[in-house]
Amino acid sequence: MKRKSKFSPEVMERAVRMVEESASQYESQWAAIESIAAKIGCTSETLRRSVRQNERDTGVIPPANDRV
């Protein structure tokens, strides 16, 4: 059973936007994720998953079943 997130969808959407907007200021996307996750109080993995889901939803990366 999936746990309900303690972060609202709005907070996670904003965090994902922050990663996208500030990625060039960090040496890697992961470094941006770690920094922003610490600022909003979630784990880096939680934010990474949201970033990856957003990338799939917007077509930046294809869904897993479409990859070869």
Image: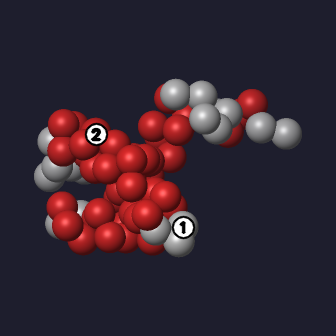
Rendered view: 19 above or below 40: above
Q: Quadrant of residue 40?
A: bottom left
Q: CA distance from mark 2 to mark 1?
A: 20 Å
Label tally: 2
Q: Relative to the observer, which residue lies in front, 43 or 38?
A: 38
Which residue lies at the image location 18% right of the left edge and 44% below the top edge? 11
- Disc nearest the viewer among 2 and 1: 1
Q: Relative to the observer, which residue lies in front, 63 or 30?
A: 30
Is residue 30 at all visible to an observer of this figure? no
On the image, the x and y values in percent for residue 2 come to 31, 46
Mark 1, Cα crowd under 10 Å, few <14 / some 14-19 / many 20+, is: few
Determine which residue is flagged by label 1.
28
In the displayed image of the protein, which residue is found farthest to the front? 25
Marked residue nearer the N-terminal end (2 or 1): 2
Report the side of 49 relative to 17 (left or right).
right
Say what amino acid the circle numbered 2 marks. Glu
Which residue lies at the image location 35% right of the left edge and 58% below the top edge? 46
Which residue lies at the image location 53% right of the left edge and 38% below the top edge? 55
Is residue 68 at all visible to an observer of this figure? yes
Say what amino acid the circle numbered 1 marks. Ser
Q: Quadrant of residue 60?
A: top right
Residue 16, numbered circle? none
For mark 2, give the secondary structure.
Answer: helix
Determine which residue is flagged by label 2.
13
On the image, the x and y values in percent for residue 35 come to 32, 70
On the image, the x and y values in percent for residue 1 come to 32, 46
For mark 1, give the secondary structure.
Answer: loop
Report the side of 12 relative to 48 (left or right).
left
